[in-house]
Amino acid sequence: MHLDRIRELFPRIEQVIARAEEVCDSDASVPQALKESVRELGSQRHQAHHLVLTSQDQEGIRRCINEMEATSDRAKAACRDGVSDTLRQAVMEAHDGLSDLKKQVN
């Protein structure tokens, strides 16, 4: 996938990850494993933002997206009963977006 296409798609990924972070932070009953996964995904989002926008290193961007998708897998797995529909939906949107992007860059 060309860098321009990644740069076009990435802002949407950032938005859904940020939404998952907001929802997760606003709910004290979120399981710890889910909180940790969503926080890690948020941290990765910040790192990827700079890389995607400024780098020409396609291999580095691909690795970064793969790592983010793996983290979103853990977040998805941590969505159990008792997690709000809003949070579950936000995590699923992030996961699905990253999975699609991963397929396109690999």
Image: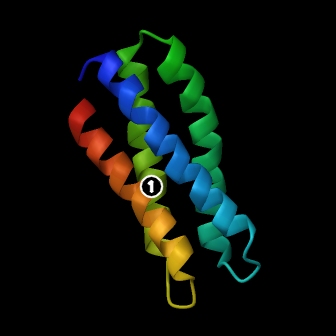
Judged left or right of residue 92, residue 35 is right
Question: Tell me, what colour scheme is on the image?
Answer: rainbow
Instruction: State the quadrant of the C terminus.
Output: top left
Residue linked to disc 1: 94
In what quadrant of the picture does the N terminus appear? Answer: top left
- Is residue 49 toward the left or the right of residue 2 in the image? right
- Looking at the image, residue 42 sits to the left or right of residue 102; the answer is right
Q: Can you tell which quarter of the image residue 45 is in?
A: top right
The part of the image, by quadrant, that contains residue 38 is bottom right
**Residue 62 in view of the camera:** no
Q: Residue 17 appears at what percent x and percent y?
A: 54, 51
Residue that sits furthest to the bottom in the current view: 81
What's the amino acid at mark 1?
A: Ala
> Visible in this render: residue 71?
yes
Q: Residues within 10 Å of mark 1 (few under 14, many from 20)?
A: many
Q: Position of residue 72 (x, y in %)?
A: 46, 56
Q: Which residue does the image show at 59% across and 57% down from the upper left?
A: 19
Residue drawn at 50 percent across, 64 percent down: 90
Question: Residue 63 sits in which quadrant?
Answer: top left
Residue 44: image location, x then y, percent: 58, 40
Total residue callouts: 1
Residue projecting furthest to the top:
56
**Residue 29 vertical position relative to residue 5 in the rendered view, above or below:** below
Using the image as rendered, state which of residue 96 and residue 77 is in the foreground.
Answer: 96
* Relative depth, front residue between 83 and 59: 83
Identified at 77% across, 79% down, the residue is 28
Please tell me whether mark 1 sits on a helix, a strand or a loop.
helix
Q: Establish if 30 lies above or below 103.
A: below
Identify the residue at image location x=46%, y=70%. 89
Instruction: Establish if 9 lies above or below 54.
Output: below
